[in-house]
Image (spheres, rainbow, N blue to C red):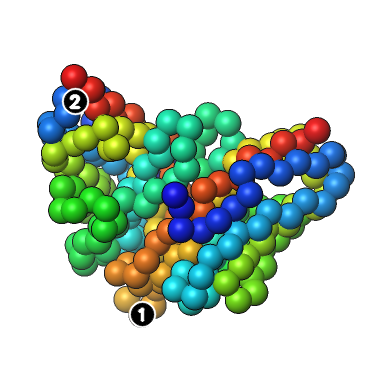
Amino acid sequence: EVQLVESGGGLVQPGGSLRLSCGASGFNFSRYDMHWVRQGTGKGLEWVSAIGTAADTYYADSLKGRFTISRENAKNSVYLQMNSLGAGDAALYYCARGTYCNSTRCYVKGLDVWGHGTTVTVSS
Amino acid sequence: QSVLTQPPSASGTPGQRVTISCSGGSSDIGSHYVYWYQQLPGTAPKLLIYRDDQRPSGVPDRFSGSKSGTSASLAISGLRSEDEADYYCAAWDDRLSGPKVFGGGTKLTVL
């Protein structure tokens, strides 16, 4: 079964740090771009970050260099290191699967697999 | 405030056809593919439409997407009670380095 499972969320004080993890199973993880998308309580979806199959990284402009995405293909995992957290970062953070690339081409079909999310709460 | 504009709510009765709009500009919808996601209450989003009008396997053909210029639409025909959900459009650059923006979402109520 294709699956993504996030972990690492929790309560953190303003200015603190947190590292989210996302474990993948059921597919060839190393061949896929991976994304983080967040959703504030009662709010819409917001793209946060992505990492390509070559470990190239991309971030939403609003993050101002506070977040770092990484992947560990040997562990079928993607991570999101979040620093200098503020109230605006409180949200449900989803891990999602993106584009598949093989040796000859890439297949762009949107974010086709999502985890259940992990909740980040920022409060003193 | 989201870059892409969706009506906050929509409604219809079972069997009806409803349409949800998504409006943007030349730098998002006008130059990139549109994707649609369905989020049932208390669950993660689910991909409904990719690349403007393509349905992933398993998505019923009651759902269809279209795009014209800087606007896109999601149509749901033969409305069912289980379609009651939040629907989000997104303008997505194929390149990871390109822009990725979501609409504010539309809550669909089946009356």
Q: Amino acid at mark 1?
A: Thr
Asked which quadrant contains residue A83, the reply is top left
Residue lying furthest front? B1
At 13% from the left edge and 39% from the top edge, which residue is drawn?
A: A84
Q: Chain of mark 1?
A: A
Left or right placement of residue B12 versus residue B23 in this view: right
Asked which quadrant contains residue A19, the reply is top left
Q: Is residue A86 above or below residue A32?
A: above
At 62% from the left edge and 65% from the top edge, which residue is drawn?
A: B72
Tell me if mark 1 has few (under 14), some (14-19) or many (20+) residues whose alpha carbon lies within 10 angstroms of its own. few
Q: CA distance from mark 1 to mark 2?
A: 44 Å
At 41% from the left edge and 70% from the top edge, which residue is drawn?
A: B93
Mark 2 secondary-structure assignment: strand
Q: Chain of mark 2?
A: A
Disc 1: which residue = A104
Quarter placement of the C terminus of chain A: top left
Left or right placement of residue A95 versus residue A75 in this view: right
Looking at this view, is B7 or A117 the one in front? B7
Tell me if mark 2 has few (under 14), some (14-19) or many (20+) residues whose alpha carbon lies within 10 angstroms of its own. some
Disc 2: which residue = A12
Q: Position of residue B39 (x, y in %)?
A: 56, 41
Mark 1 secondary-structure assignment: loop
Q: Is residue B62 above or below residue B92?
A: above
Establish whether labels 1 and 2 are both on one chain. yes
Residue lying furthest right? B15
Q: Earlier in the sequence, mark 1 or mark 2?
A: 2
Q: Position of residue B70 (x, y in %)?
A: 57, 72
Looking at this view, is B89 or A109 the one in front? B89
Q: Position of residue B16 (x, y in %)?
A: 85, 47
Q: Position of residue B5 (x, y in %)?
A: 55, 56
